[in-house]
Structure formats: structure tokens, C-alpha cells
Amino acid sequence: MASKKYWKSEAELNPNDAIVETLGQNEFPEEIPVDEFLGDKENLSASTTNRRDFLKYVGFSTAAASLAACEGPVRKSIPYVVKPEQIIPGVANYYATTIADGYDFASILIKTREGRPIKVENNKDAATKGNSNARIQASVLSLYDSTRLQGPLANGEPIEWAALDTAVKGKLGAFKATGKQIALLTQTYASPSTAKLVAEFKEFYGNVNHITYDAISEDAALSAFEARFGERALPSYDFEKAEVIVSFGADFLGDWQGGGFDSGYSKGRIPKNGKMSRHIQFESNMSLTGANADKRIPLKPSEQKKALASLFGKLNNSSVNVDLSDTINKAVDDVVAEIKNAGKNAVVVTGLDDVNAQAVTLSINEMLASSAFDPTAPRYIRQGNTKTVNALIKDMNSGKVGALIMDGVNPMYTLPNASEFAEGVAKVDLSVTFSTNWNETTEITEFTAASNHYLESWGDAQFVKGHYSLMQPTIKELFDTRQFQQALLQWMDSDLSYYDYLKETWSTGVLGEASWNKALHDGVFSMKADSTDDSSAPNDDSAAQTMDEQSEGDSSVAPISAAISTLSSSSADGMELVLYPKTGMGDGKQANNPWLQEFPDPISRVSWDNYVCVSRADASTLGFVNENVANGGLNGSYARLTVNGVSLENVPVIIQPGQAAGTLGLSFGYGRQVGMKAEMQTGVNAYTLYQGFSNIQNVTIEKASGTHEFACVQLHNTLMGRGDIIKETTLEIFNTKDHSEWNHVPQVSLNHQEVPATTVDLWDSFDRSIGHHFNMSIDLNACTGCGACVIACHAENNVPVVGKEEVRKSRDMHWLRIDRYYSSEDSFDQDNIKKDEFSGISETKSGFEEMELAAVNPQVAFQPVMCQHCNHAPCETVCPVAATSHSRQGQNHMAYNRCVGTRYCANNCPYKVRRFNWFLLNNNDEFDYHFNNDLGKMVINPDVTVRSRGVIEKCSLCIQMTQKTILDAKREGREIVDGEFQTACSNACSNGAIVFGDSNDEESQVTELKKNDRMYHLLESVGTKPNVFYHVKVRNTNKA
Amino acid sequence: MKKVLYRHQISKLFTFTLVVFLLLSNALFAQEETTEQSSEAETEVVEEAVDSGSGDAVKGKQLFNQNCAACHALNRKMTGPALANVEARLAEDEGLDKEWLYAWIKNSAGMISSGDAYANKIYAEYNQAAMTAFPTLSNTDIDDILAYTAATPPAPAAAVAATDAGQVATDSSGLSNEIILGALVLIFALLVMMLILVNNTLQRIAEANGVAMERDKVAKRTPIWKAFAQNQFLVLVSVIFLLLASAYFAYGWMMQIGIDQGYAPIQPIHYSHKVHAGDNKIECKYCHSSARVSKHSGIPSLNVCMNCHKSIYEYKGNPEGPSQEDLANGYTNEFYTGEIKKLYKAVGWDEENQQYTGESQPVEWVRIHNLPDLAYFNHSQHVTVGGIECQTCHGPVEEMEIMYQYSSLTMGWCINCHRETNVKVEDNAYYAKIHEELSKKYGVENLTAAQMGGLECGKCHY
């Protein structure tokens, strides 16, 4: 036994090793330097501090510390020296302004408190684009981004504006003399004033070339429209007027052609007088639009083109030879029949990046004289011209360009040929980038001009011809920044401020007789139809420019017959990749915005990532898997995508139900690295595959090693037959049958008799007939799942961001979530039937597993779920400390400081809407988002408590807003009229899906909605009597 | 026998009180006299002036204070020039007569536009601030005002006399206090001496009578602490009692943590609510205007202070003069004037040139009423809707020289008030319906805030 030797390291086996010897004897190989901190003995004994004193000090300091802890801190209160007249501390001010960041355009209102913008609201006065989406709602947080540039830089080193001005002006002056090109590469402004200013800049410096560049191009649609109508713009659509909507890959509820079509669409989706619009979607990715369609036909892009050609042919009764499968042919025939039936009430749109396809849809709509299609009011919110961008890169590389000035673009990130661009920039004498953040492009340019956030800027925009919108600063520049237009004025030796310039442009060119102050107050201004003339087109410069290019570019816009033949012969080898912008991230401008990163994608419900969407069939052939792992997270395989020799490594794979076989989907906006916080560097950059600015690419995909961890907030894909959560019916049944048939109230057994669950009650009911009683109505027909409400709720209620790791552990804090359900059968009803027919445990188990396999083409339903504010709330009865209680106004209150964190309430909540603060999420550098820095904290709503660790929180039905409405009325001594009561989500919802109000007010809209036959409560059988109710989803699937 | 003795004592006490009272009253009267003296002196001065001029200076003073004092002082540049001896000055320096002054006062703008040289000069000199026209003032009125401005200011001698008298008065009162204290000490000393003497005498008598002191006999008994320690029951009871008592006090102590009732921090500027809200009866909401419409009552911004303090550049004291107490605390006129200068410094007001320098320094007040963030309180709800006096919660602010937290601001305090206070529903259309329905339900005419739902958690915590 003694002969056996255990050893810890090889060195020990060597008997002569001195260190081993020493270590064997001593615990530490070296003497511990005790003397260093205790000094020599003499010193120590001479010291007056002995052990007793030491203990005294310890005792005293402990006592002092604990006593001091009882003392409240001294709080300072510093009033203004001179208070601005319009600011009253504690009262919010609203300013009308405009977001026009090159991707998102909308007229909005900004709520400010004590001069800080804290919330974005829709501008209901706006005739066009007065509604915000999730990104616009979140844009207020980007203002307070702690990584923003705080002043101008030269080669990465801070300089003064004056120095930058001198350097730039000097060089520009030189180019003026030599005639070298000065290139302005900018975002789309759609701004009359900027267009005028750029024209003046051209005049001043001579050889100025203004190139408009959209990261995600609508070039095909613009070119097609230009060829047909002579103006580089996009047509307007009003889907409210359409009875039949046919879309070929157009995600018009997302960002297709600048977005903002959803409110019109939703109005047409609510069944009125037995009628609602019918929506047929041909698409490859499962998009938000496809998810809302009555009929969705998954199809490869190449086949979509053929189907479109065939549709055109059949509408014209001309023969178009296309090679399509029988089912598709039949689908097209059905569509043709429906379109013919609807006549001018039909509209056809396409999102295919193909001039021919765009031209064909334009001509179909013209042919139909579609009432939803309006080419006379063109949209100017996409102007990018890919040809000129490519020409610029060529010019730069050939050394023709002297100066490159960029604003609102990040070509080094968004260009597929970024390296070529970088080489070009190196050959340019002067490069200036206007940017709010340090990014891929500022890295390679000489000067970085720190620019304003739009909430700090002046500006204007003409979204749609004749409809103008004004942008005004809602806060003084936080840093030493300057907006692009101001710099142009400066460099033209003008001492005008851009505000003066803007006002002058408006008073001479836009307003006519109207008042500037009123326009500024409203934020919008609509010109009378007759007074609009062509001179008001925003960028006549780029229009003129494209006219020059016409000669060479014309070939791409062929006459319709040629277009049809090109379309019908289109084919693709192998897999087709469809690139798309995600609802949360868009083109990636706001990638550093934690709200948007944590925003779960409406379809996949994955946050903090982008991924390649693969159909189930393709996944099984290629060996991709998605699995739910033991810790509750979703894991997926990695893939390598290759387009024309350009590879994108380690792309996580999501198996997407409804993805057309043979196609892949990948979203833009992710994979940014430079200037980003570590946590925000998520996903892969899809722009590298965006070759030729086409969103359709031929791609090869192969499996890569490794497993990706997703942060997915909804693991169960299908409804699993829990039919009483989402109730849906078809228009035919809705119109013909009694509501008890399609909106069945669950039955319970009372005294051995089946009675409706709503009539049975365990509890005594409280009298809620006096005063206000808040109710919220959510119409599943009107909800498109856009998620603007989710971000609005985030902003209004100081909801913290928890990060990817925590979301993966199901610790997301969203007070309002939008559940997405697939039905694995053709309809949700069939799911129910299937579930009911299970017999025995084994079959039940295997049956549910089978249902969880998402179908080839499932039906989708979106359902916003927040606290249901049950009148008989299960959470209230189990709270041991009465931290959650009910008010007579119908709101379920949550007193955070009373909560001790037992989480009984969350466990007892049938709707799972209660959120627990597992950590201190503010002032905690472990959660480096926006709650831990002074800048990010400026977005906090001062009327809502910031929650601490260990407490439960949940939707309050925005009690701070309802209380404010009540107080305003009390103070003014008047009654409250319907519509005054709002919540953050109902305010943000421009689709009319969320309606909030007082159900004790007989006149209110919510009372009327409550009486509607479509009304039902979630899980009625539980008997919770919620104050939030839903409207049965009606699908217009009776035809075909 | 004893009774007689006591009676005697009472009469003694009475005499003593009388003496004290007389001593004190002397001081009181002395003070009154001095004020009388000074006011007499002032009237005399004014009367003298009446003799010298043509107008009535007393009436003039009144008119001046009503119409001119906002922008003019006698011996000091303000928004407008100093006006002491303005008539004489104009006559001497500019050769302008009274007629010019009449015309100027009644319509200065007209004078300027008519191109009058001096009118334009003065207009330019004072930052082109047009003087309000006073067409309502008659020539006699203006004469009176001019008489007042021509009057020599109150002779400094009189003022000195007054202060001297005041000084004496304080001295005398101090003296009387000392005398009383001295007398008391003397009486006590006498009493102690008498006691000792009596005790000695008694002891001597006892010794003489052979009475043994009882003290020596007790020595052999068990000491009380030992007896206590041996009685276990008693120990147990005392321990329990001690524990309960300490728990009680510990609870009491802990419950006051974070309650800052009476918190009266030293502020960067000694702002006296007593002077403003009390003496000058300025409405609370003149300065704390946002209390009407906002959740915050708001500390007034400095421009609000300057509305008055542009012309009130020095503290002239109460009509009665600073009280004993104020003087003891150092709240003299000069002290207050110094605080006004602090305001000028903060707001960047150049007194010399009567203009803002633009160099301002916000005042960092120490916040007194600190509600925790978890509690939502809205001033306008209580002030405008409820019509509750500021004093209900903030106490007698108009008497507070130094502002302090009057109420405890605890939740119990809020709740109590909500239970007891009736909601003011009259003339408020918002309440019409709910009041009618609720009063029917509860069978009462007046509804408390609690009955309206004012005790629900979420009304204050969200």
C-alpha cells in the first residue's frame, strides 16, 4: 500500500526537483511578505495602535456605518434660473416632428418631460404615414445611446468643428478649381429643403454629384415606376379600398416600399356588413404579411415570377406559356377569377426585386383601374439608385472623385462589395462621414462629423406628393454635434442656420398662404391638390441624373410583353435565398438599440439574433435540426451560405414552418461589429450576400459544425388544439351561423348540468357599475403582429432589457407579448378535432409531438397578451402579502414595494403574464444596456417606478395614463369623453386592433366592441372574468 | 398654625411676582416709547418738507409708493433713475421746468416721439424701457410726489436715536432677567443653609436626648439585589418585561427611520417663508405655481424671485422692527439684504446697471419633502381639485423662518387623511355622476376620499 504513489504533476515524479521538495515542506514556495505590510518589529512595537485600539476602530466604524445607513441622503433640488415658459416640471409636452432616417419615415409626436424626449406617439393629424412601427417607437432610445459620437473626429482623434470646417472647405475649394468630382453619398431624405440645399451646394462648388443610396434597395420598383410614369418614385396604395389583395412576395405589412400600409389594410380586414378584404399571398419566406393572409401559397421566387406572368396573361386572356405545377396553375386560376370578380377593387403588388415583375404589377393595377392603387400621389421615401452607387465606386477607384461626403449611410456595412468601396475611399482625397455612431464607415474615412439624432435636428420631408411633414428638435444637441444640412450651409460660407433656411424654403415653396407656426405645430402640411406642381418634387437633381442614365439603363425596363417573356422563362438552379428586413431591426441602423435587439421577431419569436430560415423538408435533407433543450432554450444547427463564391459562415438555422421548399430566408440588419457594445454584436451580416442589390440570390447551403443557442420566447410552435385561446372562424360561417356556433362559450358542469362557464361563479361579484371600469378590446383580425405596441409598452413602463442569456432562460420582461400560433393542420379547427380524437396516453403523447412538427404551410394567428386584469384574479388570492389587489376601476394593481417575491402569483396566473425581476436590472453593469448609464436613463418615464430586484411586475393597463386622464378632467371640471382613456399599446396601435376605454360609459367604443358577437375572453372556462377581451379571428377563406 | 404660615407664604409670593412684573413691564414700555419716538421724528421731518415745498409730501409718499416705487427709488438707480430732488436736479442740470415733468409723467412715449432731446436721452440711457404713462395723475398729485421726492430723507440722527433707544430697551430687559435669576439663586442658597442648620440642630437635640440612629441596626439584612437574584420568578418577569420594553422601543425607533418630520436643513440662501408668506402675505401659489397643474409644487425658478426682487433690493424689516428673537438669531435687516444679494449673484443681476450679466449660478436647494419614488403624489390633485390649503400638510409655513417638514409624510398619515377628508365635488362636472351613484350606495351626502377609492394601492403606487 505504501508503495503506491499518487501524483499531481509530472514534476513530482522527479525526485531531485527542488521546487517539489520545497513544496512538500512548505505550503508556499516563497516566504509570504508579511514584513512588507507589518513593517519591522521595532516599528510595530513602537506603534501606538494596539490590538485593542484596532478592535475599537472596527467597532466604531461598524456602528458608524450602520448609523449612517439610517440617515437619509441629502437630496438637492435645483430649479431653473430662468424657467422656459412652456415647461412645467411634472407635466409632459408634446411636439410634432418627423422621423426620416433613410429607412423609416413617419410623422410622429414626441412626448417630452422636463425637456427630455421619452416617448414616440403617432401623429393622428397626419394624412399619410402618421403611424409608427416598432423601430420608430424605439428610436427615442437611440438618442440616448451611450456609444454615440460626442464630437467630430479626424482619423479617430477628436478635433474642433472649426478645424474640420477649415480642412474640408480648403479641399472643397481646391476641387472647385480643379473640377474634380465632389460626391455626396446620402440616404433618402425625401426633403424639399435638403434637395434645394444640395442643388445650391452643387452650384457653389460646381462638380458635385449627389448619389442617394438605400441600404435595402427598392431600385426595381423605382425604375419600373419611372419607366411607366416618368418620375422616380413609388406608387401609393390604400389597402383599405381593396377587396382582393394579391401579393407576390411583397411584405407590405412590413417594410415593403417604405411600409406604413398596415393601418389601411387592417381597416379592410374587420368584417363589416358581412364583408372583408381577401388577401392572397404568394411568397417564399413566412413574412408578417403572409402570416396575415387568408390564403398563402409558399412559392420560390422564380416560380412567383412565372405565376405573376401567368396571372397577367390570364387577366388579359392572352396565352402566356409558363411551366408551373398544376396546383399553382389552379391557384393562379382561382386568383384570376377573384380579381376579375372584384374588378377595380382588386390590387396586385410584388416585392420581387425585378424590374419586369414590378412593371407587370403596375400594368395589372392600371389595367384593373384599381382603386387601391394611386400613381398620381407618388411616394418619395425611397430614392436610392443602385446604378449611380456602382458608378460612384467605379469613379472612386479610378481616382475621379476628389471628395466623398456621406450622411445617413454606412456603406462599409451595407454594401455587398464593401472592400471595393474601401479601396475607392482610400483613393479619395477627402472623405467625411456624418454619423451618430462610430461604425464600419467612419473607421475608414478621414473625418467623422458627429451628426445629430433626428430628435435634435430640423428638417422636412415629403412622403407623398403634396403631403409635407416637418421635423423639429425636441431637445438641444446632447453633444457637440451638427447635422449634415447645417454643415453644407457652413461650407457654402452661409451664415444661415438650417432652421432659417428651412423656414425660408417653406414660406416660398410650400406653405403659400398657410402659417408656418401652424404647420410646425401640426407637424404636417398637406398641399391642396391643384397647387402641387412638378417643381415640388424633392430631388429633382437625382431625377435629372437618372434621366442622363436612361440611355444606358433603358434596356432593363422592357415593354410589358418582353417583361412577361422574361418572367415566364425565369428559372433558378438550386436553392434560392430571399433576403428580407426584420420587423425589429430593419436595415440595421438601430442595431445598438437594446429594445430592438430584445424585441422578439413576430414570426420566429427569436430575439437577439438573425438566422437562416429553412423549410422542414429541406432541413431534413440537409440535416439541420432545431431542438428544445433541457434548460428550456432552443438550439439550432449552423449553416454556411455561399452566393457567387461569397460565403457567410456560422449562420444559425431556424426551421421555419411555411418556408417554401427550396428557398432560404435571411434577414438584414444584424452582424454589426464596429462601435457596438459587446452584447449587441449579434447575428450575421446578410448584406455580404446582397449582390447586385437583389433580394433574391442563388445560394448553396451546407451544414456547419456546432450548435447555436437561440433566445426564443415561444417554444411551442402550434396551438396544440387549445382552441379557446385563439378562436377563429371563416367569413362564410361568420356570416351564416349564429355566434354560439363559432364563438362557443365553454360549458361547465353545475349541479350535473352543462351551463356556460360565464354564468358560474365561485366568488361574490364586486359592484363595478360605479365610476370607471376599464376594458381593453383586442381584435385578432386587425392585429398584424407588427409589435409597435411591444416597444411602446417598453418605453412607457420602464420595462428593463435583460439580455440574450436571460431571455433564453425565459426571463424576458415584456409586459406585452404577441403570441404567434401555427396550426399544424390546415386550420385551427382541424387541430382541435385531431386533439380531441387522441385516445390513450401513448397516442396523446405521440400525437402532440406530431402536432408540434410545424406544417408545410400552416395558418398563423397573432395574439397580443398582456395582464388580463381579471375581475376574479387568481394572482390576488394567493399573494401572501396582499401586494397585488384589485381596484374598482378594473385594474389589477401591483404594489412593487409590498412584494416579497414569492412568485405564487406568477405560478397561479393562467395567462403567464407576470414577470419576475431575477436581478437588479438598473444601475447594474452586468446588464449593460441602457439602465446603467446616465444617458440611457434619460429615457425613463418619471411617472412609473423603476422596479428593483426580487419583485414581480406586470402590465398595469397604464394606470399612470388613466390616472392622468382622470386628473385632467377633474381639474378642468368636466366629464371624460370616449377616446381620452388610452394606454401605451392602444396609442401605438394604428391598426385599431387595440381599443381601450371605459366600459361603464355606454357611449364608448369599447362598450360597443364588448357587445359584439365576436367578443370572447381568454380561457373563459377558468372563470377569471378578465377585463381584456378578444375578437374572434375571421378568415376570408370561404372561396377556394 | 401651619395654615397661617402658608397664607403668609402666598402673600410673599404675590409680592415677589409683583416685583418681577414691574421690572419686566418697565422694559416693555421702554420699547413702545422708542417706536413712538421714531415715528414722531419721521412725521416731523415730513412736516418740515411740507413747509418747504408746494405739495403735500405725506400724500406724495403714498402716491409714490403706489405708482412709482416699482421702478424708482429716491436715492438709487432702479429700472428708472433715482428721484430724490428730481425737480431741482432737472431745473439745475437740464433747465427743465415742472411743466416738462408733468408732460413726461403723463405721457412719456409722446415726449419721446415728439423728439424732445432730454426725453430721448433718458429713454436711451435706461435701455429703452418706456415709462408707463400716468394720465390719471393730476398736476396736484404730481406736485405732491415731487414734494415727497424733494423732502430731505429722515435725519440719520433720529434713526440713530431710535436704535439707541432700542439698545437700551434690550439692555434693560437683559438686566431685569439677571436680577430675577440672582434673587432666585439667593433664595435657594438661603433655603439650603436653613435646612442644614435645622438638621444640625435636630441631630444635636437627638444626641442630647440619647436617641440612637436607626441606621446602624439595618446592617445585617440581605441586600435587596441579592434577594432579587434569588427570586427566580421575579427575575423571569423582569427579563420578559425588559425584553418587551426593549422590543417596544426598538420598534419605535425603527419606525422613525426615514421619517424626517421636523427636517430643517440649512439652505444655500436663507429664504424666510415667514417674511414672504407671513409678513408680506404672498400667496403660496404665486411662487409655487406648478402646484396648480402638476404633480410637483415646484421650487420657483429665480426669474420668479426677480419679479419682485428687481425692485426690492433691501430688506426694510417689519413695520414693528425685528423682534427680540430675530435679533437674537441674527436676522437683522442687513442679514436679509445680504441674502437678497445672494439671489442677485445666483441669477446674475447687476444691480449697478440694472441688467442681467448672463452669468448665472443655479441655486442648489436642499430638498425637504422627500417622498420615496415608489409613491406617486400629485399636488394639483390636492390643491386644485381638492382645494386643500397648503398649510394642511405643510403646516404654518407663514410662521416658518426656516422651512421644515411639518408632517410625517408616512403612508399612515396619507391614509388617515383620505379616510377623513371629504372630496370636494361641488361645481365639478367630473364628479357629478359618480357622486350621485356613490352617495346613494353608501347613503351619505359627503364622500370621503377613501369611499371614492382613494385607498386602493394602485392609486399611489405604480
Image: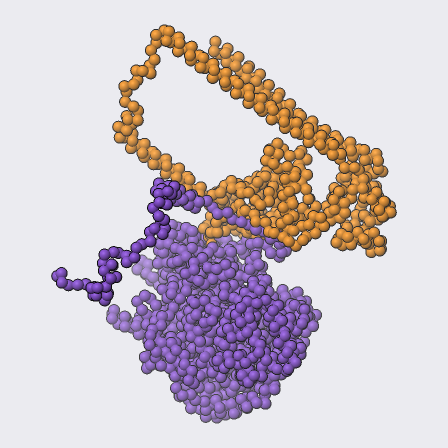
Chain colours: A purple, B orange
Residue A330 location (% of width, % of height): 42, 86
Between B379 and B30, the one lying in front of the other is: B30
Residue at (43% x, 53% y) in the render = A896
Residue A398 location (% of width, % of height): 55, 85
Specify whether residue A821 is in view. yes
Between A377 and A367, the one lying in front of the other is: A377
Residue A444 location (% of width, % of height): 51, 75
Residue at (60% x, 53% y) in the render = A80
Is A193 drawn above or below residue A360 in the view shown? above
Residue farthest top in this picture: B209
Specify whether residue A125 is in view. no
Q: Quadrant of residue A235?
A: bottom right
Position of B344 compared to A396: left or right?
Answer: right
Residue at (67% x, 71% y) in the render = A494
Residue at (48% x, 93% y) in the render = A319
Between A266 and A1008, the one lying in front of the other is: A266
Q: Quadrant of residue A965?
A: bottom right
Q: Quadrant of residue A205?
A: bottom right
Position of B313 compared to A867: left or right?
Answer: right
Residue A590 location (% of width, % of height): 49, 69
